[in-house]
Image (cartoon, rainbow, N blue to C red):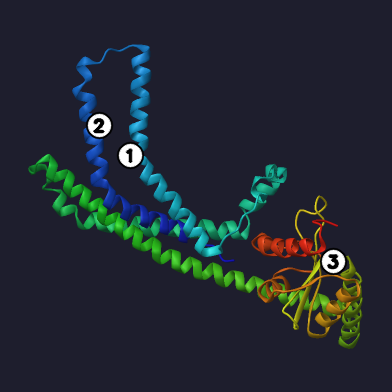
Amino acid sequence: MAQSREVATAALFTAMLLFWWIYAPVFWDHLSRLIAAIWGNAGEFTITPSSMYRFTGFLFKQLALLMAPLFLVAMIIGFFATFLQIGWLFTTKPLVPDFSKLDPIKGMGRFFSKRSMVEIIKSTLKVLLIGYVAFKTIEGEFGKALVLGDTAMFESVRYLGMVAWKVLLKTSGIMIVLAILDYGFVRWEMEEKMKMTKQEQKEEMKDTEGDPHIKSKIRSIQQQMARSRMMASVPDADVVITNPTRIAVAVQYRMGEMEAPVVLAKGQELVAGKIRELAREHDIPIVENPPVARLLHSKVEIGQAIPEELFRAVAEILAHVYSLKGHKTK
């Protein structure tokens, strides 16, 4: 799936900017109270190792509470900025040590790759564009800044904060536009790579299998052999779940040997009828459950364990079958 780093960066920067606009008064109010409390009790504070330890712990705790909302918002925005692009993807592969990444030659190769050069150019252009907009914004306020020496300190700080806020808002707008453009480019690039891959696969199949008629014959023989192997495993099933007439799925479970039930065979129409026929010949229970049959047929391949979301439904069917047989396992 297409994933743009610029989208995550723009989303995080903009969300944190908006959140800070809301949270800043609360933050400065609590920080002012904390400083006032520390300063007001400074005269009564006795410096000892234990008191300094308690004071340090208290200070870190209060600062952590103040910063916690900022970190929490950053984590949430970072998660959703990635999740909305690529969906839910859980893998432990990044945690597996990859010693090839320690190879300095390969590392330099990745650094000077075409992709790396593109990213460097994009980052450089982004910095130059943001720097130019920030410079022009500050330049436009330069005339007003000349009279700050005649104003009160509070007004000067307030004015500088206003200018900084303008710069940050314009920066956020630039990053959003760049994120949209970058996401479009990444998506287009990914689609082009997929098209090339499909074409390469088509050419490879043409070279290896040759004549289309021969390829069709080979495919027909392979399907027939796979169907024969599938039908041969039906007698080992514990239950056949049906739609009731259009779909049939044979399921096997061996407690202590399997982590989850496995689909031994499945099919529609004529194949489903053959599975039901074999089930009757070998006294295998046939259970009508259209929703479960459809899900198993569409989501689970032959020889695969059923997915976790179907555990409960299949377990209830197996429990019912075992109760009819008068035992729980074969």
Q: Label 1 amino acid?
A: Leu
In this rendering, position of residue 169 left or right of residue 210: left
Q: Is residue 198 above or below residue 306?
A: below
In this rendering, position of residue 120 left or right of residue 257: left
Splitting the image into 4 quarters, where does residue 44 fall?
A: top left
Camera sees residue 108 = no
Residue lying at the far bottom in this picture: please name it.
Answer: 213
Q: Which residue is mark 2?
A: 34
Q: Which residue is mark 3?
A: 237
The residues bearing labels 3 and 1 have C-alpha atoms spaced at a distance of 60 Å
Which residue appears at 25% of the width and 38% of the height? Answer: 30
Q: Label 3 amino acid?
A: Ala
Q: Which residue is mark 1?
A: 66
Q: Is residue 246 above or below residue 122?
A: below
Mark number for residue 207? Answer: none
* Number of on-image labels: 3
Camera sees residue 224 = yes
SS class, disc 1: helix
SS class, disc 3: loop
Q: Nearer the viewer, residue 173 or 46?
A: 46
Which residue appears at 24% of the width and 40% of the height? Answer: 28
Q: Nearer the viewer, residue 144 or 56?
A: 56
Counting from the top left corner in percent of width and height, residue 106 is at 70, 48
Which residue appears at 25% of the width and 44% of the height? Answer: 26
The residues bearing labels 3 and 2 have C-alpha atoms spaced at a distance of 70 Å
Contact (Cβ within 8 Å) of mark 1 with mark 2: yes
